[in-house]
Every structure is written in structure tokens, then in C-alpha cells.
């Protein structure tokens, strides 16, 4: 029987991920997909403090600002279509009130900055080598916020530009946290706005930049081949969503399992499994929410939360505990 896939050889020496180790994830929407799953598995994961970022220059700038503990002011925002925006941040931060934008931005930066000296794992997902520069000041933006295209100049970074921007900030972060290990990935999401050939050139630029960084920082900068898993091991449009651009839910599950198999410590896998069972228990919606059986179910779930917290005291199970306790209190008050 003919093989149906070409398995991607996984690199050796990938950094191990554990719920014990502070983790920062920055990058494209694919980073968000993986990061949300890490958070569900109870990792201490700070996910995209600037929102989704795609290009290496914006990712490097965000890391520099977090390392410096930068504070944004209203002069760095702009008003467009009734909303205040930051050109470095995703639209999730935008608001009709500038002070709300600044509070959200500066709160996330302050949180990330405080964690920098203890940061042990950094995962960066690069999406595109294309950048957009504002004609007004020549600065690369992280998000265009649907401003007219005439206000920007689009250009593709060279391998050297992408590598040098990230090299500088990674050196800085390693100085702040000597235990830091970095895992780079290239997003398998296809950027088709500029055409298929341009997308291939962009992804190739990112891959070559990653290779330069691995060679320069041998031993603590690694590459996880998410791009190759989707493009070569799966290599079929049935593994994409309806837009034929983003990976399907099944594909994301597949890449996630590769990450678990290759990078999770045995303890991390056990915690992830227990956290998943706990999440399913809390997602359960009973047919008879006033019954004694449901009350007993909640009490058993509370015991599981307490046992898990006692076994792994570094886990943050506050939300699970409060959710279960709230439901028990409602039953008792009826």
C-alpha cells in the first residue's frame, strides 16, 4: 500500500515545555491557536501581549518594548472611524476612549516586563516577510487598522533584515534571562493577498532567516517545523478550512499533538490530560441541574480541583475553583 503522507523529521534537542516554566508566545494567529491550547493545559503562558503580529520587525519591536517596560501615551495613538488605535497593536485593543486603550496596552506591557527576568521559554511564530511602512514617518506598523492603502509603502524584508532585527532583541532577552530558550516557527497560514508566488517568497525569506538565527544562537534557539508539517506532511486542501488559507481545526489538532509529543515533559502531559478532564467536567450541562446527582457531581469535581492544586501548587486553578463553587452555592441557595 502506498504511503499517504511524507512524515516530517522532527529536529532533535527541542526545548521541553512545562507548566512550571514561564512562557511567552508572540506572533501570528497560528501562535494564538497554539497559545490558547497551552493556556487550557494550564501553562503559565503570556499570549500575544500586543495581539496578533505577523512580521519579524514588529515582533522584534514588541519584544524590545516589553523588555524596556515601555509606557504608551495618547500621542502614540491615532483616531480613525471613531476609534483610538495603536499602530503597533491589534484591533482588540482599540476603543472609543483613548484612556481605555492606554490602560489595556500598558497593563499588558507591564505584566510582560515584570516576567522578563524569569522568562525561560519564548515561542515566536513568524507569519510574513512583508511589512507596511507609514509614509508619514517611515515606521513599520504591526496593524494597518484598515487605513487607506495609499498611506503605506509595502515592502518585503530581506533575509538579513529579518534575522538582524530578531537577533538583536534575542541577545537582549538572553542577557535578562540566562535560562531562556527560544522556539521559532513559521506560520502555515497562507497570505494570498499578494499572490501565491509572493507568499512563497515571503515564507522562504522567513525560513532562511530562522536558519541564520539557529546557526548564530546554536544551542538555545530552535525551530519547530509547523510550516513543513502542514505543507509537506499533510499537503492537501482537505486539511485547510473553507477559505483554503487557514489550517482546518483537524490540522491544528494534528500540529498540536506533534508539539505535545515532541516538547512536553512527561509531567506536562499528565497535567494537560487532567486539566482537559477537568475542563470537560466544568463544561458539562446537566439535564437536571437541581438534582442531588448533579450536586454530588460538582462536589466530586471540587475535590478533583483541590487534589490537582495540592499536587501541583504552581498551577493557577482559581477560575475553575470559583466556577465550581458558584454552581454549588446556587444549588444550596435554592
Image: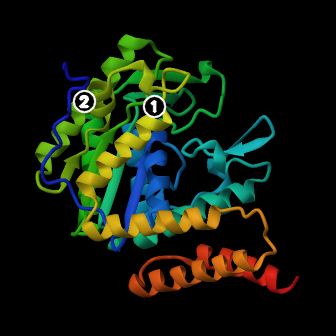
Residue placed at 41% from the left, 71% from the top?
115
Between residue 115 and residue 42, name the one nearer to us: 42
Q: Cα distance, mark 1 to mark 2?
A: 26 Å
Nearer to us: label 1 or label 2: 1
Q: Is residue 305 above or below residue 31?
A: below
Between residue 30 and residue 89, name the one nearer to us: 30
Q: Position of residue 321 (x, y in %)?
A: 61, 79
Q: Is there any visible trace of residue 28 in the rendered image?
A: no
Q: Position of residue 155 (x, y in %)?
A: 41, 22
Figure quadrant of the N terminus: top left
Question: Helix or strand or loop: what does disc 1 sit on?
Answer: loop
Marking on residue 159? 2
Marking on residue 247? 1
Q: Position of residue 160 (x, y in %)?
A: 23, 32
Toward which corner of the image does residue 205 lie, by quadrant?
A: top left
Residue placed at 60% from the left, 74% from the top?
320
Q: Is residue 237 above or below residue 142?
A: above
Figure quadrant of the C terminus: bottom right
Between residue 31 and residue 167, name the one nearer to us: 31
Residues at marks 1 and 2 touching, judged by CB atoms closer than 8 Å: no
Describe residue 23's horizontal placement relative to residue 80 as left or right. Answer: left
Toward which corner of the image does residue 99 lie, by quadrant?
A: bottom right
Q: Is residue 293 above or below residue 146?
A: below
Amino acid at each position: 500500500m502506498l504511503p499517504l503522507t511524507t512524515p516530517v523529521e522532527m529536529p532533535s534537542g527541542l526545548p521541553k515545555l512545562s507548566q512550571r516554566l514561564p512562557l511567552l508566545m508572540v506572533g501570528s494567529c497560528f501562535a494564538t491557536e497554539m497559545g490558547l491550547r497551552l493556556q487550557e493545559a494550564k501553562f503559565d503562558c503570556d499570549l500575544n501581549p500586543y495581539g496578533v503580529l505577523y512580521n519579524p520587525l514588529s515582533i522584534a519591536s514588541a519584544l524590545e518594548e516589553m523588555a524596556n517596560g515601555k509606557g504608551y501615551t495618547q500621542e502614540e495613538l491615532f483616531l480613525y472611524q471613531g476609534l483610538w488605535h495603536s499602530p503597533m497593536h491589534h484591533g482588540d485593543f482599540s476603543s472609543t476612549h483613548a484612556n481605555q486603550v492606554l490602560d489595556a496596552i500598558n497593563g499588558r506591557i507591564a505584566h510582560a516586563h515584570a516576567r522578563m527576568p524569569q522568562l525561560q521559554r519564548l515561542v515566536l511564530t513568524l507569519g510574513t516577510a512583508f511589512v507596511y511602512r507609514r509614509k508619514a514617518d517611515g515606521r513599520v506598523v504591526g496593524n494597518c487598522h484598515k487605513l487607506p492603502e495609499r498611506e503605506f509603502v509595502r515592502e518585503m524584508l530581506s533575509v538579513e533584515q529579518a534575522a538582524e532585527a530578531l537577533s538583536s532583541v534575542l541577545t537582549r532577552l538572553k542577557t535578562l534571562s540566562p535560562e531562556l530558550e527560544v522556539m521559532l516557527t513559521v506560520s502555515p497560514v497562507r497570505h494570498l493577498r499578494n499572490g501565491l508566488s509572493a507568499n512563497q517568497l515571503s515564507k522562504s525569506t522567513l525560513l532562511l532567516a530562522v536558519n541564520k538565527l539557529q546557526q548564530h544562537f546554536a544551542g538555545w534557539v530552535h525551530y519547530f517545523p509547523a510550516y513543513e508539517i502542514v505543507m509537506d506532511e499533510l499537503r492537501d486542501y482537505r486539511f485547510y478550512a473553507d477559505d483554503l488559507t487557514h489550517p482546518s481545526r483537524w490540522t491544528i489538532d494534528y500540529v498540536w499533538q506533534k508539539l505535545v509529543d515532541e516538547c512536553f515533559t512527561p509531567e506536562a502531559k499528565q497535567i494537560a490530560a487532567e486539566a482537559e478532564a477537568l475542563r470537560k467536567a466544568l463544561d458539562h450541562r446537566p439535564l437536571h441541574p437541581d438534582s442531588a446527582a448533579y450536586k454530588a457531581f460538582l462536589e466530586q469535581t471540587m475535590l478533583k480541583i483541590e487534589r490537582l492544586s495540592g499536587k501541583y501548587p504552581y498551577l493557577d486553578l482559581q477560575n475553575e475553583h470559583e466556577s465550581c463553587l458558584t454552581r454549588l452555592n446556587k444549588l444550596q441557595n435554592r
